[in-house]
Amino acid sequence: MSARDDETERPPDEVVVPIEDFIDLHAFRPRDVRAVVESYLEAAVAEGFREVRLIHGRGVGVQREAVRSLLSHHPDVADYADADPGRGGWGATVVRLRIPPRKTEQPPSDAEGRD
């Protein structure tokens, strides 16, 4: 099967977004933004990003408030704020992510193998 065949089998509504340290939400329908942000944050954490930028635009602030409402309750979000003016100002939100603890192997318990 060629890469082209693989693409034609994908459902028409599925969008594959490369994970970078920012996402521009202008490309998504307003009703989809919440799900897009949730999926993006999950992928960003999995990729090990400590900070990401969500570009929602300035407008009248509806998208900004919707995004921030989600961020205020999201378990992977440590903090968020307006971006610096050179990175979008109040048209973008910078999100600091919680870094999940590294999985470490537990040494065998001393109790194992005892009578």
Image (cartoon, rainbow, N blue to C red):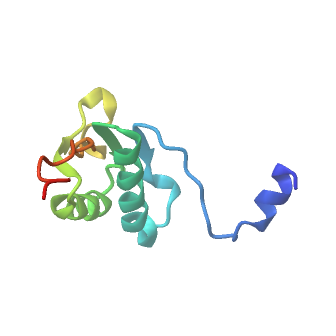
Residue for point 18% across, 46% down: 80
Question: Image quadrant of residue 98?
Answer: top left
Above or below: residue 16 compared with residue 52: below
Question: Image quadrant of residue 63?
Answer: bottom left
Percent x, y of residue 78 = 15, 47
Percent x, y of residue 54 = 35, 47
Residue for point 36% across, 61% down: 38
Tell whether 58 sits left or right of 9: left
User: Which of these two is toward me, 78 or 37?
Assistant: 78
Percent x, y of residue 103 = 28, 44
Query: Which quarter of the rendering shows the C terminus?
Result: bottom left
Tell whether 56 sits left or right of 79: right
Above or below: residue 21 compared with residue 8: above
Question: Image quadrant of residue 9?
Answer: bottom right
Residue for point 22% across, 61% down: 74
Query: Which quarter of the rendering shows the N terminus?
Result: bottom right
User: Which of these two is toward me, 61 or 95?
Assistant: 95
Tell whether 42 sits left or right of 94: right
Percent x, y of residue 49 = 34, 37
